[in-house]
Image (cartoon, helix red, strand yellow):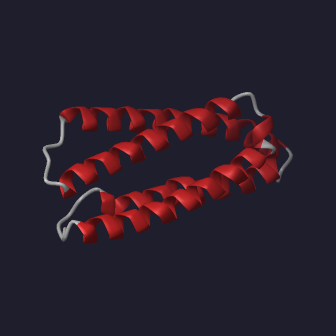
Amino acid sequence: MKKSYYAAASYTVLGLLLGFFYREFTKAHDFSGISQLTATHTHVLALGTLFFLIVLALDKQFGLSDDKWFAAFFWTYNVGLLLTVSMMVTHGILTVLNHGVSPAVSGIAGLGHILLSIGFVFFFLCLRGPIMAAARQGE
C-alpha cells in the first residue's frame, strides 16, 4: 500500500509543478496559443494522483499489492505515464518555442500509451482474483 500512497503523493507534486511550469513558461515566452503543456498537469493529476488513490482504496479492500501481477502493473503503468507526460512536455515546449516537433516525439509518446495500456491489463489481472472471490462469497 505504501507504493500506491507514495505514487499518488508524487504525482500530486508533479501535477502541481507542471501547472506552475505551464503558466510561467508560456507567460515568459508571451505565448497564448494552444500547446500540449495545457493538458500535462490535468493528465498527471487524473492518471497519477486520482488513479493511485483509487488503487490505494482497492488495495486496502482487496489486498491488491499481494497479487503476483501487482509489481508488473505498478512499474509498467508508471513508466508509461511518465514517458507519455515527458513527451507531452517536450512537445509543448517545442510548440511554445516555435520549433518543429519531430515525429519521434509522437512515436515515443505512443510507446508510453502502449505501456499505460499494458499496465491497465495488469491492473485488471490484479483485480480479477479478489473480485471473483468476493462474488463467490456473496459480497
Residue 81: image location, x then y, percent = 48, 43
Residue 134: image location, x then y, percent = 81, 46
Residue 85: image location, x then y, percent = 41, 47
Does residue 108 appear to the left or right of 73 in the view shown? left
Does residue 33 appear to the left or right of 88 in the view shown? left
Q: Is residue 94 above or below residue 39?
A: above
Q: Is residue 30 above or below residue 7?
A: below
Q: Give the residue at x 81% y 44%.
A: 63
The residue closer to the viewer here, 128 or 43, is: 43
Q: Give the residue at x 54% y 39%.
A: 77
The residue closer to the viewer here, 42 or 56, is: 42
Q: Give the residue at x 55% y 53%.
A: 48
Does residue 38 appear to the left or right of 46 in the view shown? left
Q: Is residue 27 above or below residue 86?
A: below
Question: How many numbered marks have been drawn onto this rendered protein structure?
Answer: 0
Residue 33: image location, x then y, percent = 17, 67
Q: Quadrant of residue 18?
A: bottom left
Residue 1 in view = no
Residue 32 in view = yes
Pick out the residue farthest to the front.
28
Does residue 78 appear to the left or right of 54 in the view shown? left
Q: Give the residue at x 22% y 49%.
A: 94
